[in-house]
Amino acid sequence: MTQTIAPRVRTLVLLFLATTGLLLATAGPASAHAALTGSDPQQGVVVDKAPTQVSLTFSEQVSLSANSLRVLDPKGKAVQNGTPANLSGTTYAVRLHSGLPDGTYTVTYHVVSADSHPVAGAYTFSIGAPSKTSVAVSDETVGGGLVGGLYGFGRYMSYAGFVVLVGGAAFVLACWQRGAGVRAVQRLVVSGWVTLTSATLLLLLLRGSYTGSGKVGDIFDLDLLGQVLQTKTGAALVSRLLLLAAAALFIAVLFGAYEKREDEEKRDLTFGLAVGGVVVSAGLAASWAMSEHASVGLQAGIAMPVDVVHLLAVAAWLGGLTALLVALYKAPAETPVDSAAVRRFSTVAFGSVVALVLTGTYQSWRQLGSWSAFTDTWYGQLLLVKIGLVALLVGIAYISRRWTARLAQTVGEGSRKAPEKESVSVSGTGSAARGATKKGGDTKAGSAKAGDTKAGGAKAGGTSKRDAQLARQRAAVDAARQKRERDADPNRFGLRRSVFAEAGVAVVLLAVTTVLTQTEPGRTEEEAKAATSSSSSSSSSDASAGAVTLTMPFDTGGSDGKGVVTVDLDPARVGANEMHVYVQRPNGRAFDIPEVKIAFTLESQKIGPLPVVPDHITTGHWSANGVQIPVAGDWEVAATVRTSDIDQTTVSKNAQIG
């Protein structure tokens, strides 16, 4: 009774954790999958005179090529001068030709984010007055077409190959060591290795075209391949191939020397294979973690090992499930998968689900910026689908555990009757030849007595061959009978069905996970929407109308310590701004002080303080160019003024910026 209740309680707890634990994500900053958060000139704005450059600010650092940033005039002619450059942090700019005429200009960008995903887009601004343009303005799409489809297929197959390779090998070592000699299981693990290796080579060839032109003809461009090898993603793919060479050696030992060892000899080799397998598996998982979402943003040093654990848990659960399914359907009668192996896998699966819930909760916290992101973003919606599939999978696993318990009970009852059956089986098998000989014994005995010694020897030799052949036939018949009896067992049949259903859900879950890794995280998507919204609202009015002026009286407490500090921020929008600071006496007369500093804080999103130290221009006047405001919001602008070596104070006011 205890053995039945305990799995039920544990499974119900897991079902609850799987459906609610991942929903405990709280709002917090994270960064992955770059999004455009600011531009200068802004989208749709009309400027009085031609700018000398166009700058774009992203949510994270990006990789640029010579044509990553382009500016096109109304006729579609490129007017940028030189190649794009990094101004500071996440802001990139390209210089423009001088003397540009009035009209509407189109800015296009095509970059690769730090998490390996290509990002593209376009917008317009006007000089003097808007005009007609021959350039079709629409957000550029990357990663589409035939190359994008092949790349997505390659990603899915690489995940599937990893899951089958790692999970299948783990199932053999940890749950069913006799499975090392089963051909169907061997083929499964080897097919996982072949799939992962082929998919990795495919991704390596497609990478240059996928992040660039998207043309099929560029797949075999050796120059592009050379550029890919110099990127973080290219290095990760090459590392994966090297680790797969070590995995091939592991497979050869597992299904070669290990399978041929006796049970006692296997114990020593099992430990060595387990250590080596964990190292290689963790290295393969790290090739994803170190080049994709987990490698950038908040707490990357923690996120990468957490992602490795997440991937290993997925492989142990879903890959082991696949190996169990193959064993239940394809294992030969003389080497059936027993209930003990199923129970051991159930324990492994339980631990894997716990690890998935914990690591998945942490990753959700990183990738979702708010509760609304669950329903308002594509990433959040996919995550909800994934959570639902995990809950369904755990529910089916609970049914499988019940069938396992029944199967174990049946085997236990059968083992108590085994001595009687075994004696019958052994006597029947051992006397098979004797029974066959007895049927024709009189004739053979008579001829042996009547015949000469040589003839008797020949007949005896023929009889031994026939006996051996008959024994083999009876063994085959017995094996077929045992397989029929085993397959007729309702408990084993029920376990097969439930495991098959689990595997079907696992395939869909793996597909959703693959799409999720290519989707812009919810936090970044919402940040991009906010930046676009603020740009649109700002561009609806004159740029100078958005300037903010804050006047703040101060008193440092010392002699001549009273005055007024004025901060002008123009155009007070997301992106680069020009700031002027003026210090005056109470009577309105400008005067100098030893030091003045400004800091910007957005408390609602836990951003800042962002310090700015302006340059002294003239008496009572300080200035700073390119002051970056990352997102729109109600910012606190704090001014720290020092009127002597020891007299200092900080005054502040809030202002809506962006």
Image (tube, grey):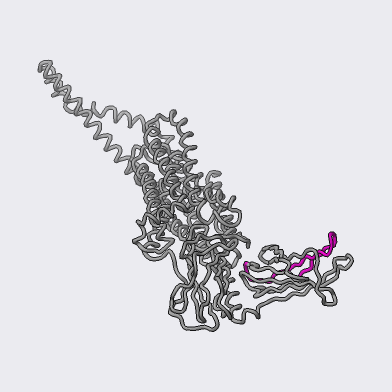
- Most prominent secondary structure in the magenta stretch? strand
When asked about the image quadrant of residue 642, the answer is: bottom right
Residue sitting at x 65%, y 79%:
544
**Residue 285 x %, y %:** 48, 48
367 sits to left or right of 479: right
Q: Seen in the image, is 425 located left or right of residue 287?
A: left
- 153 vs 546, left or right, is left
Question: Looking at the image, which is closer to me, 532 or 267?
Answer: 532
Quadrant that contains the N terminus:
top right
Q: Would residue 121 be seen by someone viewing this image from the given angle?
A: no
Q: Position of residue 267 (x, y in %)?
A: 46, 31
Query: Camera-side residue: 11 or 607?
Result: 607
Q: For the C terminus, which image quadrant?
A: bottom right
Which region is colored magenta?
A: 630-652
Q: Position of residue 122 (x, y in %)?
A: 49, 72
Task: Answer left or right for 460 relative to 411.
Answer: left
| Picture quadrant of residue 625 | bottom right
Is residue 530 within the magenta segment?
Answer: no
